[in-house]
Every structure is written in C-alpha cells, then in structure tokens.
C-alpha cells in the first residue's frame, strides 16, 4: 500500500459564522471552547494517523502565515509540511487536482491522498482512524472513497449520499449524490437507512483520481497542470511551498469536486461512519458544543441576565446585560455585533453577503488583523487620521515600503525597534518615536527577544491599506523580478 498523504483543504469564508469568521480570518481559524481552532483539530487528526510523516495543505496565499502559526504550535517538527498556495479560490476540484499532481510528482502515483476539509469537527478520533483504514483498503482497489456520516436527524442543510451495492470492508458503491433536500425528504432519508450525510472527505490513490479526472474533468486537470508548470516553489527546513501562478490558475474552472468528478465517475465508494461529526455550519452548531445552564443559556464572557432563556451569548471582551430575551444568538466582537433568532441562524450569511456587496471592511477584516510579522489593531479612525496598535514578533520585520498619501508617526510602547526612515537606520527604545513623511521609504524590524509594541498614528488624505508600495520583503510579498 502506498504512502498516505493527508491533504487539508482550507478554503471558504464561513459567512454563516459572521462576525467571528471573515474573509481574511475564515472559519478554520475560529477558536472553539477548548481554545483550539478547527484547523488545529484537523491537523492533529491527520498527524495522529499511523505512518504519517508528511502533510499537505491547500490554502489561500493570504492566510498562509496564520496557517503556519497554528501548525507550528502543534507540530514540533514531527511531520514535514507541504503547502499549495492559491492566489484566490477556484473551488475544490482544482484544489484536489493540484494536490494529486503535486503528490504524484514528488511521492509517487501509488500514494494515497486523504482529503480533509479544515472547517469540520470530528470528536470520535478512534472511529475516524478506523474509517480511514477501511477507506484505504478500498482506495487501493481503485475506488474514489468518500466518507458518509450516518444521519442522526433529518437535516436539510447537508448534501446526502445514497448507498448502492455493498463492497468489502464495510463500504458501498455510491448510487448517487443528492442535493440538500426539503424537510419531508430529509425525514424519509433518515427513516429509510440508505442515505448518509456527505462529509466532503475523500481517500483516493493518486493514479486513480488523476485517471478519473482525465476521463470526466479533463479541462480541470489540464488547466491545473499548466498552472503547476508555471508556479514557483520554495523548499527547506521540512517545509515546501508551491505558490500557484495567478494568471494560469484563473483559467481553471471554478467547480466543486462533487460536480466535476464524483457525480460522474462510476468508481466512487462510500464508507458509512459515525464520527461525532459536525460541519460547524452555523451558530446553532457552535452552541451545541457548550453545556447550557438551568435556563438553557450558553454564555461566553461576563453577563448579567434577567428573565433570559435559551440564548447563546458570546462576548469575551464586553459585559452583556439582557432582559426578557428568549431563543437569541448574540455575538459581540470589537467592531460588529450580531443579534439573531436562533431558529434562523443559517440566514446570517445574508448579512455577510450584504456587507461584501457594500464593500464594507467588516466583511473582510477584524479590527485586529494578522500579518506574517505579527498583528495590528485599529484603535480609532476618523477623517484624515487612523491610530493603530502594532505588535511585531521577535526577529520579525515589516517590508521596506512607501506610502503616497499618508504620513506615519511611530511611538514605541515596549520593546526595541530597528527603524529605517529614508536614508537613516537607527534604534528606538521605549517611549521614543519617529516621523515618516509621505513618499519616504521605511521599515520596522524587531531585533529583540520580546514582542515590540508600537502606536502608529497615520495622517493624510487617503488611509487605505492598499496605499503601500513594497520594495523588499522577507515573506515573499514582493514579486520577484522577471529574469531576462
């Protein structure tokens, strides 16, 4: 049996979990009540499988460093890490095609790819390991194996898989994939015993998935192969990065692997399993992870409640008072507040969609934004000014950059800063400051062993984050010059 390569697919904005999940800090990075993110739980589940010494992740280029931070807290060097970095999302079919071609080239076509979405929760890890072992046996026979969750309720928010002919190892040939049903149909599926929830997890030999893609989705395979040939690779320190070329990747069809391949192939099998699985697809699903008090309330943060029942309140940084409330979801973040009827939590996505239509920052960013070098938090902003708190990690560096429309005043709160300001380079200690004029090149470096904390005061006619020209950057955010 070939090498098993878990492939974590970390895409999607999780709009039904706004305002915690946002485009620049999507659902896989959400912390659950135990403090771990969904991405970290997926990583641990993958790394805990037998004989796994290499993990592949397909994710967006913009969240790569946040992904690496989550992994490094857990990995401790035990697994080599491969990353395929997408410039933008093109759905799961191109992502899986890229993973299969990458693994085939580096680790052999007999390797098995275990595709795992990063935004799901699996609570029964031992049952997951057993399901993977069964799936690997079928995958070795050439089946594209999917994992079907034995339904426990009549859910209308999930796609379903209908079981067909029985196979060995407890699997079944897939008779058909079914779209999200209405309530009466979902009830029939639950009672009939032939239908399973589609978990979107797969186990496949690389040669089998490439063969089936060539047959059923040749345009996906060809476009992704062209993209990989034009893409840039970095390798070192047990970490490999393959950054997909944006021009050629844009030509790949934007299509899910279910539509492109699974619904067309005759070689798809399903392993029924009960894994304590949840797609964490709404705030109702999140609240199910926490115990309720005698009034049916689940609260995270300080609350004072009077005649309040069956409410989920998440406000870790601000006191919430409530009077006469029932069956509400209240999610408080520093820059946005959600109040929703619990029974309509799936409709939160409409708020996120409207914010995106308006071009509102609250769709894309939190007030605290993660960068490769640390974080910045917008403390206050108004016409022609913005105040930020900047935290730079030890030995980290911002890019050498310039702004056309704004000046910046930097004040060191704690730590030591190495500053480039035009032609000058100098150290700033606590309570010292510097002023940077518009159009002047500048850079901020933390040469110390503790976090550098600064206050930045921006002033100018335009203060958008896109007013930045980068000249050099240690994190690869400046395109390499074209070689003649």
Image (cartoon, helix red, strand yellow):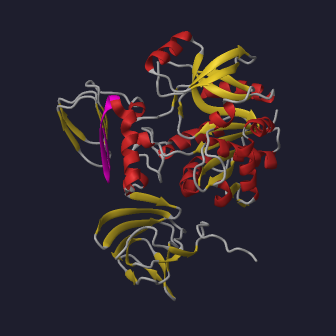
The percent coordinates of residue 220 (x first, y second) are 70, 45
452 relative to 484, above or below: above
| Nearer to the camera, 481 or 374 | 481
Residue at the spot 54% in from the left edge and 68% down from the top edge: 396
The percent coordinates of residue 145 (x first, y second) are 70, 28
The percent coordinates of residue 392 (x first, y second) are 47, 66
446 relative to 42, above or below: below
183 relative to 428, above or below: above
| Nearer to the camera, 483 or 437 | 483
The percent coordinates of residue 69 (x first, y second) are 55, 54
Residue at the spot 36% in from the left edge and 28% down from the top edge: 291
Secondary structure mostly taken by the magenta-highlighted segment of the chain: strand
Q: Residue furthest bottom?
A: 423
| Nearer to the camera, 418 or 356 | 356
79 relative to 285, above or below: below
Q: Does the image show residue 352?
A: yes
Q: Does the image show residue 245?
A: no
Residue at the spot 45% in from the left edge and 72% down from the top edge: 467
| Nearer to the camera, 290 or 59 | 59
| Magenta-colored stretch includes residue 341 | yes
In the figure, is residue 482 to the left or right of 386?
right
In the figure, is residue 394 to the left or right of 359?
right
Residue 265: quarter of image? top right
> Which image quarter holds the C terminus?
bottom right
> Which image quarter holds the N terminus?
top right
> What is the span of residues highlighted in magenta in the rendered image?
330-343
| Magenta-colored stretch includes residue 12 | no
């Amino acid at each position: 049996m070939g090498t098993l390569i878990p492939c974590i697919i970390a895409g999607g904005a999780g709009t039904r979990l706004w305002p915690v999940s946002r485009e620049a800090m999507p659902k896989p990075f959400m912390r659950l009540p135990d403090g771990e993110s969904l991405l970290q739980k997926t990583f641990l589940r993958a790394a805990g499988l037998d004989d796994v010494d290499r993990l592949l992740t397909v994710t967006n280029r913009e969240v790569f460093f946040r992904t690496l931070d989550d992994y490094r807290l857990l990995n401790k060097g035990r697994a080599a890490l491969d990353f395929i970095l997408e410039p933008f999302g093109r759905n799961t079919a191109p992502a899986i095609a890229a993973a299969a071609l990458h693994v085939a080239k580096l680790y052999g076509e007999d390797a098995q790819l275990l595709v795992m979405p990063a935004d799901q929760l699996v609570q029964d890890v031992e049952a997951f390991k057993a399901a993977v072992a069964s799936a690997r046996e079928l995958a070795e026979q050439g089946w594209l194996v999917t994992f079907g969750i034995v339904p426990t309720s009549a859910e209308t928010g999930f796609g379903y898989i209908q079981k067909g002919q029985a196979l060995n190892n407890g699997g079944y040939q897939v008779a058909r994939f079914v779209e999200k049903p209405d309530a009466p149909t979902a009830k029939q599926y639950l009672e009939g015993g032939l239908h399973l929830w589609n978990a979107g997890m797969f186990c496949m030999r690389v040669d089998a998935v490439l063969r089936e893609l060539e047959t059923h989705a040749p345009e996906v395979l060809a476009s992704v192969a062209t993209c990989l040939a034009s893409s840039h690779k970095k390798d070192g320190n047990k970490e490999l990065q393959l950054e997909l070329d944006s021009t050629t990747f844009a030509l790949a069809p934007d299509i899910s692997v279910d539509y492109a391949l699974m619904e067309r192939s005759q070689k798809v099998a399903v392993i029924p399993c009960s894994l304590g699985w949840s797609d964490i697809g709404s705030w109702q699903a999140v609240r199910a992870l926490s115990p309720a008090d005698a009034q049916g309330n689940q609260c995270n943060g300080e609350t004072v409640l009077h005649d309040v029942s069956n409410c989920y309140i998440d406000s870790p940084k601000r006191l919430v008072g409530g009077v006469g409330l029932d069956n509400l979801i209240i999610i408080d973040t520093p820059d946005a507040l959600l109040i929703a009827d619990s029974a309509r939590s799936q409709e939160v996505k409409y708020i996120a969609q409207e914010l995106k239509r308006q071009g509102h920052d609250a769709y894309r960013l939190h007030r605290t934004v993660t960068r490769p070098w640390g974080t910045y938090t917008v403390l206050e902003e108004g016409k022609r000014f913005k105040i930020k708190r900047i935290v730079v990690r030890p030995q980290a560096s911002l890019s050498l950059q310039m702004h056309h429309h704004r000046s910046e005043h930097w004040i060191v709160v704690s730590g030591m800063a190495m500053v480039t300001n035009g032609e000058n380079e100098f150290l700033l200690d606590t309570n010292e400051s510097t002023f940077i004029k518009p159009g002047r090149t500048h850079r901020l470096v933390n040469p110390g062993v503790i976090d550098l904390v600064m206050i930045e005061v921006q002033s100018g006619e335009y203060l958008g984050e896109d007013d930045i020209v980068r000249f050099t950057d240690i994190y690869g955010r400046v395109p390499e010059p074209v070689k003649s």
